[in-house]
């Protein structure tokens, strides 16, 4: 079975997300949610294209980024969910439930 790709948007623990994702059989692509001006959508286009499911860390992302990600995910027909904490394990468990 092909490994599923999870995009985690928000937070700053890229290595932790990737390691923990691997243990669960997931490929994790991470973006801290920060943008440096310009079109916010451009920052997230590539990561969303790659992902089977997108998890947004609500406490670790600006609203403008969250809305941009949500809009892109909807346009691309990607599954998206929100995680309240900053923790990698909770976000990854949620991703696993979604991708089955």
Image (cartoon, rainbow, N blue to C red):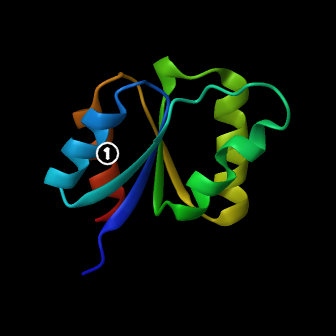
Q: Is residue 89 above or below residue 45?
A: above
Q: Quadrant of residue 76?
A: bottom right
Q: In the image, residue 72 lies at what x, y percent?
A: 71, 52
What residue is drawn where x is 40% and y is 54%? 6
Q: Nearer the viewer, residue 56 or 11?
A: 11
Q: In the image, residue 2 lies at what x, y percent?
A: 30, 78
Q: Is residue 32 above or below residue 1?
A: above
Secondary structure type for disc 1: helix
> Extreme bottom residue here?
1
Q: In the image, residue 9 lies at what x, y percent?
A: 51, 37
What residue is drawn where x is 41% and y is 24%? 12
| Number of numbered markers | 1
What residue is drawn where x is 72% and y is 39%? 68
Tell me the residue that label 1 is attached to. Answer: 94
What residue is drawn where x is 81% and y is 26%? 37
> Extreme left residue here?
23
Q: In the image, residue 5 lies at what x, y percent?
A: 39, 61
Q: Quadrant of residue 91?
A: top left
Left of 75 or right of it: where is 83?
A: left
Q: Is residue 23 above or below residue 50?
A: above
Left of 23 or right of it: where is 100?
A: right
């Amino acid at each position: 079975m092909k490994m599923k790709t999870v995009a985690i948007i928000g937070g700053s623990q890229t290595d932790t997300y990737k390691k923990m994702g691997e243990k669960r059989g997931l490929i994790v692509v991470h973006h801290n949610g920060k943008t440096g001006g310009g079109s916010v959508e451009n920052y997230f286009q590539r990561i969303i294209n790659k992902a089977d499911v997108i998890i947004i860390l609500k406490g670790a992302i600006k609203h403008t980024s969250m809305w941009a990600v949500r809009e892109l995910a909807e346009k691309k027909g990607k599954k998206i969910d929100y995680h309240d904490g900053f923790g990698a394990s909770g976000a990854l468990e949620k991703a696993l439930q979604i991708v089955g």
